[in-house]
Structure formats: C-alpha cells, structure tokens
Amino acid sequence: MSPELSYWFFNKLENDHFSLIYMGEFVDEITETLIRANIASIDEPEILKRKLSFLMVECFQNIIRHADKPEIINVTNNKPKMFLVRNIGKAFYISTTNLIENSKSTNLTSKLKSINKFTREELKADYLDVLANTGFSEKGGGGLGLIEMARKSDSKLEFDFEGINYFFSNFFIQVRLGNMNKNENDNTDADILKSSKDLYNGMVKENILLLRKGDFSQQSILPLIDLIKSNIDSNKKLPLFKKKTLYILIEVLQNISKHAKEENGKREGLFMISLKNNRYTINTGNFIDSADVEPLKEKLENLVGLDEKGLAEMYKKKILNEENNKSGNVGIGLIEMGKYSSEKLKYNFMRHSDTVSFFSLSITI
C-alpha cells in the first residue's frame, strides 16, 4: 500500500468530520469496542450518542445474524464484511455490507421497500405484529432489526445489491441519524451510499482492514488501538499480536496527535491498516505547514538511508541528546518507526494549498 493512497482516501472523505470503516470478521465481542471507538470521537449531546449507539448495535447485529457465507471460499466470493460510520454535516451515516444469497434478494427488497413506505405509527404497528405473530427466526428476528433501524433513524433505509457471481451479491444498507444540511450542493442519502460503496471497493482492492479519518485527540486513540488488536487477534492464521506491532501502532497514532497541523482546535488526520501476505502496513496522513516540508523531507531521507546498525546508533545519539537537552525530542518517534519497520519507511508530500501540504507515511511490519 503506497503512501499516496492516504491522500486519495482523505479526499474521498473530504466532507466527513469523522469516519470509521472496519472490515473483517464480526463477533459480538467487537461490538462494544466499535461503539467506544466511534463515541469517543463524537462531540454531541448524550441523547444523540445513545440513539447512535443503538443504531450501531442494530446494524452490527444485522451482519452477525443475516450474512451468508459460501461453503467454498474463493477469490470471487471472498468479500469481507464492512461496518462504517460517517459524520457529514449534522448527519451521521451508518452502513454495513455483507454477502447474501441472490435467492434471498427479492424478498429482502420487498421487505425494505415496504418499511420505507410506512409512517412512524405504521412502523410501530408492524413491529408489534412481527413480534407477536412471526416471533424469532433461527437467526434472531423476523425482520425486527430492520424495522427498529427505520424507527430509530431519521431516514429511509437506503440499500443496494452488488452482484458477485451467480450465487451471491454484496448487500449494502445505510441509515441516517440527524438532519442533512439544506445547502443546494449537499449530497443525497443515495449519493452517500454510492460513495461508501466506492470506499468499500477501494479498501477491498488494497486489503485495508481499518480506516479512520478525523480529529486524532488523545481520548480517541485508545479505543482505536483496542479495535485493531481485536481484529488481529481474531485472525487465527496469524501469529499472536506482538508487543512490537502494538508499540508501532501507538507511535504512529501519537505522531498524528502531536504533530498534525492544528486548525480550530483539531488535528485532522487519516489512519489506515492493511494486511497482505501476513504483513501489516500502516498508512497515516495529515496536514503540515508547507514551510516544514523540506526540513522534514531531509530528516526522512537521512533516516531511510540507514541500515539497522545505523538506526540503532542514531537512536542512541538522540537519547543521549535528550538527556542533556530536554527540549530536543523531535525525531525520536520517526527513528523508532524506522527501527521496528520490516521495510524502509515510505513517505509522500502533496501540496494541498499555497501554505498547507499533506504528509503521508507508510510503515510495514
């Protein structure tokens, strides 16, 4: 995964105040971690946070209960599930993606279209009718989750199917909480779903497990690390989560938190982690002053030109310098990333405006 991709994804999420996209296996234990990772980044009244948490749980459970899995996994149908939360304007969008057998799509489409036609009173009546007469299916509920999503949200249920092969399609569903901006150029809910589908396909192509865009304040970092750890621990084909990996994750997140250009009290950035051939690649991206590009580029060029022995020597000198000069701690994080990375650090600078540039960094573990 090249560092330039960070800028591509950042631009795709340009209007998002906050985004979190998770790809992979879904089990009940991850629900709480996902919710904490989202809520920690949202500065909204408690009542809205509670409604948002409820919808996250319903969407998450919808994947666990109703996703279909091919008996034989191959390149064609090996599509990961997705859970996505985006904050655009005053609205929050929650989307999920999972495989579904094509034979089920007609009934599901009919059910969703019916739900979207109902008034609030009709939704409540339908909910009670399903609860009383249909009861619970083997997978949890006879459409109760979908009805509840519609009842608790402020929108129709946007959905779409993307054909995979003769047997399976990817099923995308989206709910909105909060009002859309009324500006003439604002996207519609359907546009947001299409954008999320593009993000999904881009992440599948690049083997990305997790993407987060937004303000990287200290309180939002710990839940994110927990989520990454849960994803890696759930993959039984990989060795157990190593301290070195966790250390690098903390270092790169702290690097954004401390050094991204601050605007309006926020340090906006992007973080991605991908998995290919049992190796993790971490990509970060954030704005910096254009005047700082050349000094930083010079430091990085010196860093990537060193071998393991040279990195250890540079690290030692920097530590000694810090002991004698407490103000001189710039560069320690980058040196440590270089030490623990299994490949040379990769980086890129893109001019974003006359005074601001976008700095991307890629580390492979």
Image (cartoon, grey):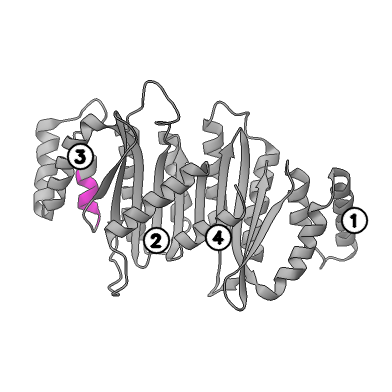
Q: CA distance from mark 2 to mark 1?
A: 44 Å
Q: Which residues are magenta?
A: 147-153
* Foreground: disc 1 or disc 3: 1
Question: Which amino acid type is shown beneath numbered disc 4?
Answer: Tyr
Label 3 crowd bin: few (<14), some (14–19), many (20+), radius 10 Å: many
| Viewer can see residue 270 | no
- Decide if residue 264 is on the left or right side of residue 88: right
Q: Nearer the viewer, residue 51 or 74?
A: 74
Q: CA distance from mark 2 to mark 4?
A: 19 Å
Report the residue marked by disc 2. Answer: 87
* Foreground: disc 2 or disc 4: 4
Report the residue marked by disc 3. Answer: 144
Residue 181 belongs to magenta span: no
Label 4 crowd bin: few (<14), some (14–19), many (20+), radius 10 Å: many
Residue 42 placement (x, y as % from top left): 44, 60
Which one is earlier in the sequence, the residue at label 3 or at label 4? 4
User: Circles 1 and 3: CB distance less than 8 Å?
Assistant: no
Q: Nearer the viewer, residue 29 or 65?
A: 65
Report the residue marked by disc 4. Answer: 7
